[in-house]
Image: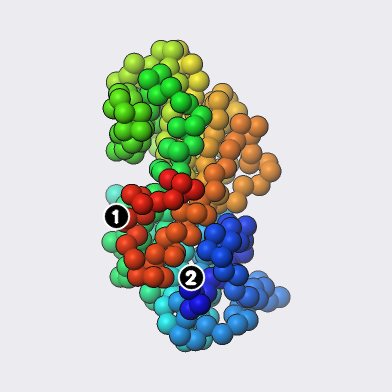
Amino acid sequence: MHDLKIFSGTANPRLSQSIADYLGVPLGRVSLGRFPDGEISCKIDEDVRGRDVFLIQPTCPPVNENLMELLVLIDSCLRASAERITAVIPYFGYARQDRKDEGRVPITAKLVANLITRAGATRVLTMDLHAAQIQGFFDVPVDHLYAAPVLNEHFRKVVPNLDEVVVVSPDEGSIKRALGHAKRLGSIDKSGGVSVAIIDKRRTSATTTEQANILGGPIEGRTALMFDDMITTAGSIRGAARVLHDHGVKEIHVGVTHAVLCGPAMERLREADLASLVCTNSIPLAEAQRLPQTQVLDAAPLLGEAIKRIHRNESVSKLFREAPESVR
């Protein structure tokens, strides 16, 4: 792997270091700073000519700063004659506007995909996109990873008796995700009997939603597992947790890939009375964003294994079937 070079932006250097440690290669040297007017300065401090370069930078808050830094890094490597430039974006921001659902609105996810491609990225590696169709917005190959194996392995250890588990979808948009987790947890248990429930979420105004009913089950006396791709303001999680508590669940565990946690998220999560909140380290968590029951899982083995396979021109889709114990 002597041709492999990994560089990190400033968004999540700890994750980048963990990925480099997993691969057994040093992080590349790069100087990132700011000019007096706030513009980003960048210099790659080692030779990348003809190398296979991976740039690790989630576009998490502050989104605009981190996105612009990624574009500058890509351009720096392009102009330094790197052979291939892969943008490793564990969390892809600007993903919510992925279609024109009303007049005079942008498709921002497509705009950002264009920016990354035009800057010079020849490949993108990302994890749990807000909408899978965003892969089609890129004119370069996209490897889309899922954190489900990491989350399932965790809950397999935490909740060994899966007969008492119900996997809950917090809204209709997460039904497919909930069914996937239930199927895999059931296959682990060899019973195939992990039940699924769906929270009926209805929008009551432009800014508020209401959760009142549960479809499926049974619920009472069971341990509820809720999965989602991200938590931003935690409105859906709080509403779903209230309905589940009202219907007599024993405890609630929430598993998400990206803990964005902005605005009133922390207050709402405290009100939700969760047994645990499990997320990956795709986004760095400040101390103020951690509840006592928060657990952060390491996504570095998953991302590192994908980087290794991309570098060696091996199949990434096989990763979920052949993953080492640290990844599954």
Q: How many marks?
A: 2
Q: Position of residue 67 (x, y in %)?
A: 51, 65
Image quadrant in which you'd find residue 40: bottom right
Q: Position of residue 123 (x, y in %)?
A: 38, 70
Q: Residue at x 33, y 49 (%)?
A: 321
Q: Is residue 325 above or below residue 211?
A: below
Image quadrant in which you'd find residue 236: top left
Residue located beneath label 2 in the image: 54
Name the N-terminal-most of marks 1 and 2. Answer: 2
Side (left or right) of 80 relative to 315: right
Side (left or right) of 115 relative to 24: left
Q: Residue at x 34, y 16 (%)?
A: 218
Q: Residue at x 43, y 28 (%)?
A: 225
State the SS at label 2.
strand
Q: Is residue 297 above or below residue 317?
A: above
Real-space Cα separation, disc 1 to disc 2, in angstroms: 23 Å
Q: Is residue 189 above or below residue 176?
A: above
Res 303 label: none
Query: What amino acid is labelled 2 in the image?
Result: Phe
Residue located beneath label 1 in the image: 133
Q: Is residue 276 above or below residue 80?
A: above
Select label 1 or label 2 by which is in front: 2
Side (left or right) of 260 relative to 105: right
